[in-house]
Amino acid sequence: MPPTSPEPADYRVNPAWHDLSGLVTTAAERPERVIASPIDGAELGRAPICRPQDVELAGRRARAAGRRWAAEPLSRRRGVIERFKDLLAAERDDMLDLIHAENGKSRTDALEEFLDVLLTAGYYAAKAPKVLRRHRRRAALPLLTSTYVHYVAKGVVGVITPWNYPLTLAAADAVPALLAGNGVILKPDSQTPLTALRLVELLRQAGLPEDLMQVVTGPGGQLGRPIIDASDYVMFTGSTATGRTVAAHCGERLIGCGAELGGKNALIVMSDAPLGRAVAGAVQACFANSGQLCISVERIYVARPLFEAFASAFADRAAGLVLGGGGGWEVDMGPLISQGQLDKVVEHVDDAVSKGATVLTGGRRRPDLGELFYEPTVLTGVTDAMTLAREETFGPVVALYPVDSEDQAVALANDSEYGLNASVWTSSPTRGRAVAERLRAGTVNINEGYAAAYGSTDAPMGGFGISGLGRRHGAEGLIKYTEPQTVALQRLALIGPPAWATRPAYAEAMTVGSKWLHVTAGELVRKVAGR
Ligand code: NAP
């Protein structure tokens, strides 16, 4: 049985969290949902159960405020985000307390998302002028045409987020949407609205106009459609099933959407992998936030010569993780978020065991720590007949498989409809890159589980296959919140046959010109030289 926290449910609750519900947009008084900690069920605050009329009001406010905001110079928008970053940094301890209490994740896991938001806000504040600047593009006719592109805010962006990273997943999309000049309607998951509301409170303290970022709370099944109707672009993070519904509604309206969805992520341990580092990295990749992380690893393929040593060291290290509900740094893993999530984990593991899988460690609930605790669980002998072989568990459960070749590892890793994240462990960067490029996943980490790629905020992040649509992070994560507009000025002559030339002569000249227009100087020299 893994060690437990010395103080199982010792965490700090701030009475001010009760005031956060006042930041939610409501058109009339609404009943409230109690927000309870998954650690012990204690009430942390409340949030209104909004209705579609509240979303309509939020949409009108965000749209009007967005028009004014888009007319502000980018320097003012950046200033707000810079101040927000400073305020957030100063509020670190309270923010970590809130994330821990509301989501249940350990303090270290809460720190991971807190740092991610500082990095993302700083990155986009610094990057926005370069990405959003008006810039020239190669024009239709050299000298006669001059063409530039500039970026017009979409208007209102709907941001719908899940419970597992309640700070990061709200900020990572709302911050670039705001910097691009949009109003935002944020709908956090009903289980974790307080963290998102605290984010909005800090943004307003930093100078964000009050109406610009609206928050509605309540069931996504009822508020999703009105949010899509009130938005010009929707950024959705959550399950693949809900993502399909959201994308279909956006399609009906012909508005764009981004979707960051589920994963069944694979990690490959090559025959030349540094074993100790691979074991430590794999434990982090599988059990961070109790495995409730879209980019966490649920399948590990190990080169057969290393399999026994890896499996035994990995299971030992997983068994040594400290479980508990305490808010101190010594805890590694907290509870699952809800009874539904726990039931799914139990169902997946019981199904696998009943069909012949072997439990190397874990496989048990821990009611001694609280209702929702489950041990980090490592399985071998998992076959396709078992549900967890292909379905996302989204919990602290991983299956280990021996493989006989690099090709087999790649083929098995790619044998999934999902394609979010992957990880490769090897002593050879060249070999690692070669394998990485064969994997069908939006991010691939070499000698890291997930943080190297996700933390590279300048690089796009998202999924292949049913893991998503579009990308967050990087320039892609900012431009998607704009409509690029091309402005072309034509001088002297119109584009078309001139009066002084015959149409056949024009056709001849333009055919040759069009063929050569985009040829580079080097290509031209090679063509002339006949090479
Ligand atoms: P979910 O059920 O899809 O819920 C996510 C959000 O969508 C919640 O705010 C939910 O609201 C809302 N929602 C529910 N039904 C809706 C509808 N018909 N229209 C619009 N919104 C609706 O997701 P989950 O199961 O809680 O979250 C875990 C999943 O998210 C996992 O599959 C995980 O892999 C994925 N995820 C992906 C990423 C990524 O970046 N790729 C990141 C984190 C999580 P209510 O819950 O309040 O009703």
Image (cartoon, rainbow, N blue to C red):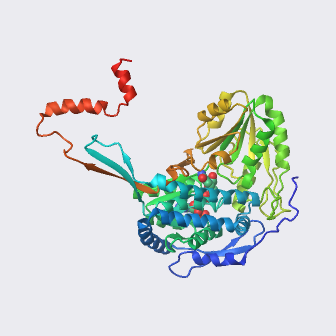
| Residue depicted at 27% across the width and 45% down the height | 145
Q: Looking at this rendering, what residue extends furthest in the bottom direction?
A: 29
In-image side of 369 versus 528 (left or right): right
In-image side of 314 versus 160 (left or right): right
Q: Please tell me in which quadrant of the rendered image residue 369 appears.
A: bottom right
For the image, the number of numbered tags is: 0
Of residue 518 and residue 247, the one placed in the foreground of this image is 518
| Residue depicted at 55% across the width and 71% down the height | 216
Q: Is residue 352 visible?
A: no
Q: Please tell me in which quadrant of the rendered image residue 383 appears.
A: top right
Q: Please tell me in which quadrant of the rendered image residue 168 appears.
A: bottom right
Q: Is residue 286 visible?
A: yes
Of residue 25 and residue 428, the one placed in the foreground of this image is 428
Q: Position of residue 355 (x, y in %)?
A: 76, 42
In-image side of 284 versus 158 (left or right): right
| Residue 282 vertical placement versus 330 (above, below) | above
